Image (cartoon, rainbow, N blue to C red):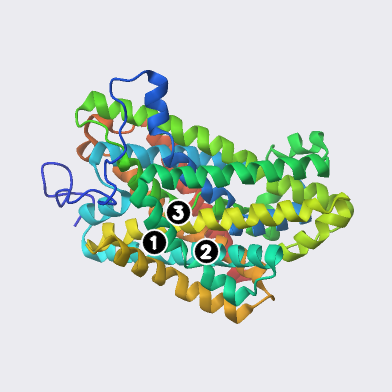
Amino acid sequence: MDILNPNTKSGWRHERGEGSLSDVYRTVGTGRHSSMWRRAAAFAGPGYMVAVGYMDPGNWATSLAGGSKFGYALLTVALLSNLMAIVLQSLCARLAIASGRDLAQACRDAFPKWVSVPLWAFAEIAIIATDIAEVIGTAIGLNLLFGVPLELGVLITALDVFLILFLQKLGFRWVEAFVIALLGIIATCFSIQIFLADPEWGAVITGFFPTTEIVTNPEMLYLALGILGATVMPHNLYLHSGIVQTRAYGHTVPEKKEALTYATIDSTVALCFALLINAAILILAAAAFNAHGKTDVVELGDAYSLLSPLLGLAIAPTLFGIALLCCGLNSTVTATLAGQIVMEGFLKIRLKPWVRRLITRAIAIVPAAIVTIWYGDQGTAELLILTQVVLSLQLSFAVFPLVMFTASKAKMGELVSPLWLSGIAYLIAIVIAGLNIKLLLDFVTG
């Protein structure tokens, strides 16, 4: 049986059910009769929540390790990951607006259970890996800034459930405003640190050009895949396809096309901004550590303690700690929403909002807390990098369905991806799968 051969005339095996994130579905007005700038502003927000995936604590670990060990060489991976993300996130918006489904709902409605249930399991594994990174990062941030023990820091991260409930009662725009405000703080902290580090800008520019060593050097490839997994994250694909539907765009084809245009602009601009932050982490590591012979900095705590003597100012590690804490808080908010989208979309579970969030958060935070408490201060950096590689390995199970759905005229109607876009998307999916196979072969052969 062809798993992409639906039985219904709409192109899907099952008709669409309740909207994604039903409690905030289409609650944000789009100002249909306003100016172009006001309408663009009304659609701005979801892209920045997705951009959080670029700068979560797991990304810090891979970028710090890559920058300290290989200098600016892996900047090209950050750039390529960003370009991949722009394409894939635009497909998420296209899927959501054209079909009225998030990616989890689309998998449930397109595939038989023997396919959709394993996809749900893979998505949950990805969210657990994401949460391990975020719990560790937030706990380390609290420890570095305030001396809070890691075990207590892990428990404090669970409070984001109540933070999201409070903000969403005020309106989904408040959730977006909270995330964007923290992104502004992160950008400010890194701007100051980059200024203090004074990197070699010629070497920075050269670092954005690819080199064959990334593929031929297993250690560099491992870190490169970690950066890829930290950038193009599986849960972001589910998240974006869900939160785009918080906008009250119309139901006609012209209205959907306009909504797709604004949503794509939002995600593209946000991801370009995120590239600056993502690259800044690696540039800081290269300028502050690699340039001074510190090629083995992988612990976030080590980076924090080394910044002051290397950059010459006591404020440098404080800025690092503040940015890390903001990253952790932002990431836990978006991962919790992604967990809700995945559980509701795949399993069609309908519970009260606070119960749903508590369950989805517990599924991810319990194993994250156990691992964090077990490892304590030792080995957290290796664990952070491992979570990002796990995310990279899970990525294909979200990317291939997304590309297949958006390339299907039967499923997407007039908003089907043009052939050139589908071609690029399939190429990205194949490249990701190929890199992951190479990584597995390196593991097997030692």
Q: Position of residue 133 (x, y in %)?
A: 56, 64
Give x and y (percent) for residue 54.
56, 48
Indicate which disc, 3 or 2, sits on the residue closer to the N terminus: 3
Q: Residue at (70%, 62%) from the top-left corner?
A: 145
**What is the C-alpha distance between the residues marked 3 and 2?**
19 Å
For label 1, the SS is helix
Vertical relation: 336 (above or below) 260: below
Q: Kindly report which numbered mark, 3 or 2, lies closer to the viewer in this rendering.
A: 3
Q: Residues within 10 Å of mark 1 (few under 14, many from 20)?
A: many
Residue 302 appears left or right of 27: right
Residue 90, percent from left and from top? 41, 37
Could one spot residue 402 in this view of the protein? no
Is 252 above or below relative to 226? above
| Residue 87 visible to an observer of this rendering | yes
Estimate how packed mark 2 is, as few (under 14), some (14 to 19) or many (20 or more) residues with alpha carbons within 10 Å. Answer: some
N-terminal label among 1 and 3: 1
Residue ID for mark 2: 390
Q: Residue at x 47, y 65 (%)?
A: 159
Residue placed under numbered mark 3 in the picture: 334
**Cα–Cα span, label 1 and label 3:** 15 Å
Q: How many marks?
A: 3
Specify which label sits upstream in the sequence, 2 or 1. 1
The residue positioned 44% from the left and 29% from the top of the image is 265
Q: Amino acid at mark 2?
A: Val
Query: Residue at horizontal 51%, vertical 37%?
Result: 270
**Residue identified by numbered label 1:** 123
Marks 2/1: CA distance? 11 Å
In front: 215, or 185? 185
Decide if residue 198 is on the left or right side of residue 254. Answer: right
